[in-house]
Amino acid sequence: MNPREEKVKIITEEFIENDEDANVGKRKKNSKVQRQLRKKQPPTTGPDKMVSEESHPGNQQEPAQDEPQTRLLSVTARRGPCSLPPIPSASRTGFAEFSMRERMREKLQAARSKAESALLQEIPTPRPRRLRSPPVKELETEFGTESGKEVGSTQQEDDFQSYSRVKFHVSARKIKSKPQVPPGFPSAEEAYNFFTFTFDPEPEEAGEKLKHQDGTDQEEEEGEEEPPAQEGANRMDEEELLHGKDAEDFLLGLDHTADEFLAVRRADYESAHVRLQREKEMLFIPSRLTVPTYKKLPENVQPRFLEDEGLYIGERPEVARTNQNIMENRLLMQEPVRWFGDDGRILALPNPIKPFPSRPPVLTQEQSIKAELETLYKKAVNYVHRSQHMIGSGDPSGNFQLDIDISGLIFTHHPCFSREHVLAAKLAQLYDQYLARHQRNKAKFLTDKLQALRNAVQTGLNPEKPHQSLDMIQKTINEYKSEIRQTRKLRDAEQERDRTLLKTIIKVWKEMKSLREFQRFTNTPLKLVLRKEKVDQKADEEAYEAEIQAEISELLEEHTEEYEQKMEEYRTSYQQWKAWKKAQRAKKKKKKQATEEHPEEETEEPYAEEDPVKPTPPEPTDRAVIEQQVRERAARSRRRPGEPTLLPELSLAGSVTPNDQCPRAEVWRREDVKRRSVHLKVLFNNKQVCRTASRQLGTDFRVHFGQIFNLQIFNWPESLTLQIYETVGHSSSILLAEVFLPIPETTVVTGRAPIEEVEFSSNQHATLDHEGVGSGVPFSFEADGSNQLILMTSGKVSHSVAWAIGENGIPLIPPLSQQNIGFRSALKRADAISSIGTSGVTDMKKLAKWAAESKLDPNDPNNAPLMQLISVATSGESYVPDFFRLEQLQQEFNFVSEEELNRSKRFRLLHLRSQHVPEFRNYKQIPVYDREIMEKVFQDYEKRLQDRNVIETKDHIDTHRAVVAKYLQQVRESVINRFLIAKQHFLLADLVVEEEVPNISILGLNLFKLAEQKRPLRPRRKGRKKVTAQNLSDGDIKLLVNIIRAYDLPVRKPTASKSQQPSRSSRTFREKHAASPDTRSPTHSADYPLGQVLVRPFVEVSFQRTICHTTTAEGPNPSWNEELELPFRAPNGDYSTASLQSVKDVVFINIFDEVLYDVLEDDRERGNGIHTRIERHWLGCVKIPFSTIYFQARIDGTFKIDTPPVLLGYSKEQNMIIERDFDSVRSLSEGSYITLFITIEPQLVPGESVREKFDSQEDEKLLQATEKFQAECALKFPKRQCLTTVIDISGKTVFITRYLKPLNPPQELLNVYPNNPQATAELVARYVSLIPFLPDTVSFAGLCDLWSTSDQFLDLLAGDEEEHAVLLCNYFLFLGKKAWLVMGNAIPEGPTAYVVTWEKSHYLIWNPCSGHFYGQFDTFCPLKNVGCLIGPDNIWFNIQQYDSPLRINFDITKPKLWKSFFSRSLPYPGLSSVQPEELIYQHTDKAVAAELQDSRIEKILKEKIMDWRPRHLTRWNRYCTSTLRHFLPLLESSQGEDVEDDHRAELLKQLGDYRFSGFPLHMPYSEMKPLIDAVYSTGVHNIDVPNVEFALAVYIHPYPKNVLSVWIYVASLIRNR
Amino acid sequence: MAAGGPSVFLLMVNGQVESAQFPEFDNLYCKYCFVYGQDWAPTAGLEEGISQITSKSRDACQALVWNFPIDITFKSTNPFGWPQIVLSVYGPDVFGNDVVRGYGAVHVPFSPGRHKRTIPMFVPESTSKLQKFTSWFMGRRPEYTDPKVVAQGEGREVTRVRSQGFVTLLFNVVTKDMRKLGYSSWPADTQSNPGPSLPQGTPG
């Protein structure tokens, strides 16, 4: 650390040691503590301690000196940390040294005792310090940074204080008694130290430090000496201040008082007045008063108000006057001038805040909303991209041409000019001047004019026109005369100038000649020849004389006039003078009298008034004098009579001295000139467009370029600049000068433009070491260096600029309109109102008026475009482009042409990817080069694009469906695109995970949970954590299928008599063995004599071609309770919500019966082995789309198994009969059921519905009412579905009741059962269910449920529950039933739509997709809860306690149970329906259906089955097939009922030898794929018995409107042996 | 690749998450990961890392020093989607719950050489005062669903964040073949000769 601090530490340590010497015993304890203290403290405490140790004792010892001392100390201490010299002792004189030494000695003693006392008191307590005077306080604050440490020490100090007080007396005594080290004899070292200290304290300190480290014996003494020395020095300073020379005595006296520790002195007090005084020196309170302007400005400067001068100054920001004054005063205290502007105010930038909002006000949603929201239909227009440059685009041809001809360059001065060149240039210049003057010949013109005027005067004086008044004549003559005078003067001046020019030419030529002679060589070929023209001397003289005479007479005349005038003046003034004189005389007389009386006053006022000078009479003009003057002037300015006229002629005929005859300096110069070359650059709008070739500088300093540049331009040029560059040797070129060329008038076209010369000059400084005179440096022609000249490089460029002429002779000039504003920057123009298409602002006058009224500052640069617009507009030549440019700078950024960009495969790939085209959305690592991109990458995409337009009939069997599929595809795409856009709208929850604020109930539950049992007996299902889809990958998602149990599966039927006794080998396994374990299965039937198991079912789940199956259970009501796990793969590995939503895969749950066949050929082996063959017979299936699972998160319930209408070999009759008696509920439903639980692990968050508000054509009031209604319903029963508006296929919101309207079903359906309404209803329902099902969520990912009208639905032949339900409901309404749409939840569909009808006494619930109907109290009804009912004219929301159809009342007339939308307060407005008036059905072409049936579906399915059996031969039994084919139409006509027995009988009859297993499948026809899937899922093809045969028959029953009912009969046959 | 030179360029980044300035927090650790475009693929090194817990230094600057190394090499065909490093800093709150202390992201420097980056860190704000209190009380502060969202702009408009502190990162960046593929990431004056123009594939 710093030495000073260290030293202080050492001092204190030494003090301690001293003390130990002095009082060994008692002090020891103290000092030990002391040491500890020291050790603890880091050395940084130095200065502080020093102060406290030294100043405090001083307080007590030297009351008189205390304050100044401490202050001084504070000063030194302040200095301490940064600069070491503690004592300003350098200036000390010898005397001071001497006296100081003595003082030091005494100080030493004093310090010792002081040190002891300091020890006693130890470090002073904080209290006395607080009492110290302000300067000491200041010192404290000085070290405030170390307060922490100080606190640490003071704590200890407090402990010491009491202790030291006790010890006080003892120590005091001891100090007195103990003799000090004799002070009078300093050792040599001490002395040395002393001296060194005095002269240079620092090295000494350093040395000292070293010594301390050595730890020698001297250490102690040195250390002891040091501090007093310092202190003494400190004190001395102040002593000198305070007491001067007698300080010594005072100090001596102090020694004695030093022992008086208890000296009391009064607390320092500074009176408030003094302090205020002092503060005034330091502090400054700015006044609030206005500062007079003169203070703020530099002296003798008047304030200048720029605004008054018409300059623009912005509006200053608002500042309170007082604040401004304060600031001004403050600034004035510092440096006044810089801060104030010319007007004496503080400089300020204009206020940047606009007074008006820049965003247009949002219109409040008042009643006028409809008008504002009303949309206007405008036909979409293709955007045609204009890549033309901004200005050119408005005009047909954007190419204009400017021809710039640069012919040459002449230097009028150049650094390489020799003196001769300088003269030559001068001469040339003068000659040029002469030529110019000569051409104009002004002198002659003036002479002629003079002559004419004189003649006029002559004629005027001899009046020949008497009718003119004399006055007039006089007046004109006077005018003439004055004109003559003027002209004469002018002529004289001209003549004189001519003459002097001639003279200078001659003079320069002479100089040049002498220079040539002097230097003995010639550099320039210039030669001046003076041609003399002889004149007729006599005539000349006469003319001369006449001229002079005329002039003289004129002058005389003038002079006499003047004289007379002056005389007049003289007279009047003389009169005045005389009068004054008289008065004066009278006064004098009076005065004389007065002076006699008061002689002394005379001198007091000698002449109070200034006496007018006596006017002198003007002298009459003397003719001789005038003549003299005239002649002199004539001699000066005019050719003397008879003197020949000199005509100078400059020629370049002279010869230049060749190099070898020149001196070396000149040769160098010439060589230098040769090395130089010059070129020009042409800058158009500050951009370099071309440059000339580099030409060598000729010896005559002329450069010939002769180049013409054709500039193709778009814009009106703003500037044309030539830059002149000079290159010396091979070094880089230097810009000599810039020349601005004027832009030619539009009339100037090529060929007509004259060559013009533009002068330029450079500020280049060049000094050369040869004869060249340089540039910008003084030189002289004289030998003595007088008459210095400084010439700058300068010259002339000859050029011409003109507009080019196009091929057809039209000049290529930008139109005038452009020109008007073309002078401003093109960019600025783009910003101006004009280019944003002010065609809207049509009324310019209004605009101008507004501008005037709003007091726009015309000087404000911000308003410039507006002002310009106004000025242009009001001046009449308004040019307002009628276009608005969005991408005005597009072309500037196009670095390749568009075609080239499009050609690039890489760019195309990047572009498609960024457009989220599905094929490329996840394309990774697009190659760098085009050549690495395979063409086939695009093939799929291109194919798809083509497909969009071409209807492909390959996949689709009939064209109609192909069209529909295409249409659906397109709708889907557009909706997906819309969805993708909507997906960009994130919610906070999408991004930030935040805990919900727990409400009281949750908190309570949580508290309750604490007391909960760890493992409750009845555990509750806990919610799983939902996973957002995006961070998933393949294999993360599993589909869990829990197969619990099934009811009422069909059981095997004992085969009829013929096959009842089959060969042994074909007997079923169970028939022989094992009794049935299933106790539930009734075995009392006579058909099961051996107690054979009725059925051994197992469940196979297939999903995405993964198959899992359960173990085999037994009996018709099996219980598996197994969990199957199936992996899920998202398409393309894209696990985004959108992608998951559009997964179309279906989970197939197939129930099979496992049949074991004993294949043992030999009974003898029965004991040794079991040879069985397992066959599986399909019993039925349940299909659940993945999308349903995805949206439902879990599917839990009992489902009806979709069993084929005819299941050969199986029946459920037997047990049914019995059970029906007991179980009335079950009797209602026929069929088998399975209980399932399906979920996805982990749980996925289903996508949110599109948060998009669609526009609507509904009445705004109605829409508001719907919102209100929905909000109210959601408040009461948030889970119940309430639907009021839906979105139609064009994306518009439509009120839901508009969909319901009686619509006619196909007439042929009505004709079937004309008298049986129930049967008709069923038939209609069947017809509706035959229309293929296509969920919206699949086709329109993102849950935006689109409702199509019934005709659209029938045209599309695809739709989901809503469409089916609407159509069915409409048919029922047509049939005269009371029917409603039911919105609710069903299994497995989730939220869905059903139809409820009122049938006389009970309600029926229709599933529109399957065509089944259920009674209200059917437990197996898939509809599980009811949200609302929708009729053609109203909506009723279920406000009953329960929502299960079993438990609710469907009586909508009760307002307590059903909340209706339209009520008395809001009556039904009679909304028109969106449905068509009538549905028109076309008959389906039966031939097409037949063709489809035979050649297509059947063929394809057969091929497929063969494909599925790749390792086996697939034989087709034709006989069987034809039998089946005959049978299928029967099934259709009976709708799969009551045909089984007949069928079986027939089959048996025909196929007696075969064991037959097969079943008909029935489904609506949409595409091929579902058919194939259905056949596949039955697993018929899985039989691998070698002699198996297959039969497959397809029947298509056409219904109107292309609704096709497809029957597929698939069977396997095994020949019985 | 045989004839036409390289088909990818490489970007090698190493460096370290040097230190952090979180004036109010202590005992923090940080996690980093990289976010890059579709044309990028890491070829070597670690894409993600989680650092040790560090305590404040005792000196006045109170820096939290991790000196946690980063070392990764990317290959790419396209500068679009240039890698960004996403940092998230976590630490215990007063109740000892591990909460997030800041998110931040910065692009890996484009030009080769040594670069020091100081990135400001921020956390999402609670949606209400009450939520703020409960989140503080429960130690479940709002967090981003995925720290990588801080490297993209999509959806950020719905969030409100608060500044927390700064993290200083040091990158040493080496690139290979960028010049050959027509990209130059150097300042213009150090280029002695201009690189080849944008590669244009030869047709066919």
Image (cartoon, coloured by chain):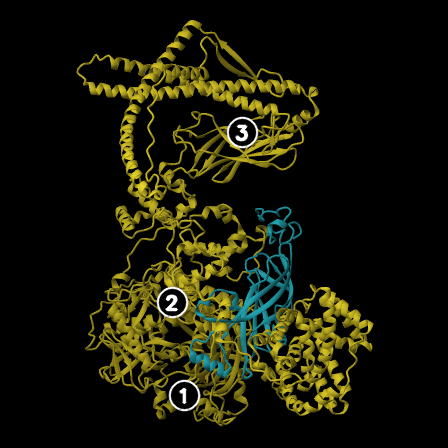
Chain colours: A yellow, B cyan
Q: Is residue A1550 visible?
A: no
Q: Earlier in the sequence, mark 1 or mark 2?
A: 1
Q: How many marks?
A: 3
Residue highlighted by disc 2? A1596
Q: Chain of mark 3?
A: A
Mark 2 or 3, which is nearer the eye? 3
Mark 2 surroundings: few (<14), some (14-19) or many (≥20) residues within 10 A: many
Q: Is residue A1014 above or below residue A235?
A: below
Residue highlighted by disc 3? A795
**Residue A676, position in %: x, y?**
62, 30
Label of residue A1172 in the image: none
The kind of residue on which mark 1 rests is: Ser
Q: Is residue A1071 above or below residue A936?
A: below
Determine the CA span between mark 2 and mark 3: 102 Å
The kind of residue on which mark 2 rests is: Ile
Label of residue A1001 in the image: 1
Find out whether the residues at labels 2 and 3 contact each other: C-beta distance under 8 Å: no
Q: Chain of mark 1?
A: A
- Which quarter of the rendering shows the N terminus of chain A? bottom right
Q: Nearer the viewer, residue A1364 or A39?
A: A39
**Residue A521, position in %: x, y?**
65, 19
**Residue A1450, position in %: x, y?**
27, 83
Q: Are labels 3 and 1 assigned to the same chain? A: yes
Q: Are labels 1 and 2 assigned to the same chain? A: yes
**Residue B131, position in %: x, y?**
44, 79
Mark 3 or 1, which is nearer the eye? 3
Q: Secondary structure at mark 3?
A: strand
Q: Is residue A577 left or right of residue A1136?
A: left
Residue in the image at 34% along x and 60% along y: A357
